Image (cartoon, rainbow, N blue to C red):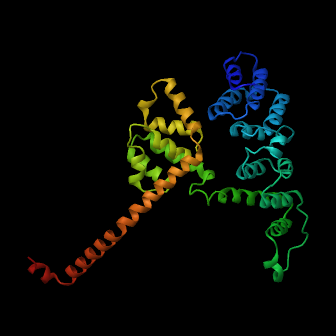
Amino acid sequence: MSSADFRQIAIRAEPGKAERLFRATVSAFCSLTRPSRREIAQLEDLTLPLFADVPIESRRYVAAALSECEYAPAALVRRLCEEPVDVAAPLLIRSRALSDIDLIALIGRHGLPHARAIARRKDLNPTIAHLIRALEKPTLVSVRQPEANAKMVPESAEVVADSQQAPGAAAETARRRLRSMMRDAESGGAAINPFAGANTYVKLRETALTGNAAFFQTALADALEIDFSTARSLTAHQSYTSLLAALRALDLGEERAFLITAAVYPTEFSHPQAIRIFLDRYRLLHRDAALDRLRGWKAETLSKAIRNAGPIAANADVRKADSDNSAASPKARRVRP
């Protein structure tokens, strides 16, 4: 089936045929050798609104089909993985659309059933594998390790040993460690922590809705860890392109990104087509590209700091010296020309 066939199915949306359209659209998509980003976004646009009206058998069918698909849409895969394990298992075991962060989040939310399916993945991150074993077998260590040997105990054994303090503590301890990994997993690749996004979003939304540009720019500078002047330049253009990249780097959902952008650029969205264009641009903007731009802004901030550090420090020292001299010699101040 060609790309044109997939587009034709997408156009032919008949009311009352949710299940058939759901299956047919995914089948047509999976037959594409190399779908474009637009076609991936189009599949998500078609299937996610139908999800609640589709029976579990069709969800199971789609999960199995997408588990073998190299370019499966991430949003649809993540939505299917929130289903019970008998639906999500093929994706949990095989899908390449799931990152380590996604797997950790799923274990944290769904516990042992999803963890067992994830444990069957090839090339599973060893740390995740150890924590799954600790979650599955909380009685691996029945006594606490002596203090003399404490330094030689492996991390996974420590997790299990601590769990003997109370029934069910092993699972909770493992989940806490998994959540800790979620917070730290991307610290090497980007300075923005996507799992701290809730508070960031609220701060950006509330400052954007005040209508005071300086308040929002300050919040944006804090969120991106850049200086105020750079954050101000992101919203100084007539186009929202730079702000779009900033919000994508923060990994905000498209609805949240749109609300903030519409509050900052209210005149840009006077008709529905403008909203559609925004959503298309946001979906097609790859997060790695947005993070590259963020690194450039950070480099610019650092460059400014380096350029200004010398003169500012020198001027500060001169002002301090003048102040000290004036305070110590009031007569000298009077005789100065």
User: Which residue is at a point 79% across and 25% down the rendered structure image?
Assistant: 23
- As drawn, is 110 to the left or to the right of 325? right
Q: Residue 148 falls in which quadrant of the image?
A: bottom right
Q: Quadrant of the N terminus?
A: top right
Q: Position of residue 7 (x, y in %)?
A: 67, 23
User: Which residue is at a point 86% across and 66% down the rendered structure image?
Assistant: 164
- As drawn, is 59 to the left or to the right of 246? right
In the picture shown, does residue 316 fall above or below 172?
Answer: below
- As drawn, is 324 to the left or to the right of 53? left
In the picture shown, does residue 321 fall above or below 11?
Answer: below
Q: Residue 152 falls in which quadrant of the image?
A: bottom right
User: Which residue is at a point 40% across and 40% down the rendered structure image?
Assistant: 211
User: Which residue is at a point 54% across and 35% down the rendered structure image?
Assistant: 281
Q: Quadrant of the C terminus?
A: bottom left
Judge by depth and name the residue closer to the eye, 2 or 61. Answer: 2
**Total labels drawn:** 0
Q: Position of residue 221 (x, y in %)?
A: 46, 53
Judge by depth and name the residue closer to the eye, 210 or 128. Answer: 128
Q: Position of residue 209 (x, y in %)?
A: 45, 39
Q: Position of residue 109 (x, y in %)?
A: 76, 48
Q: Does the image show residue 334?
A: yes
In the picture shown, does residue 302 fall above or below 101?
Answer: below
In the picture shown, does residue 180 fall above or below 293?
Answer: below
Q: Does the image show residue 168?
A: no
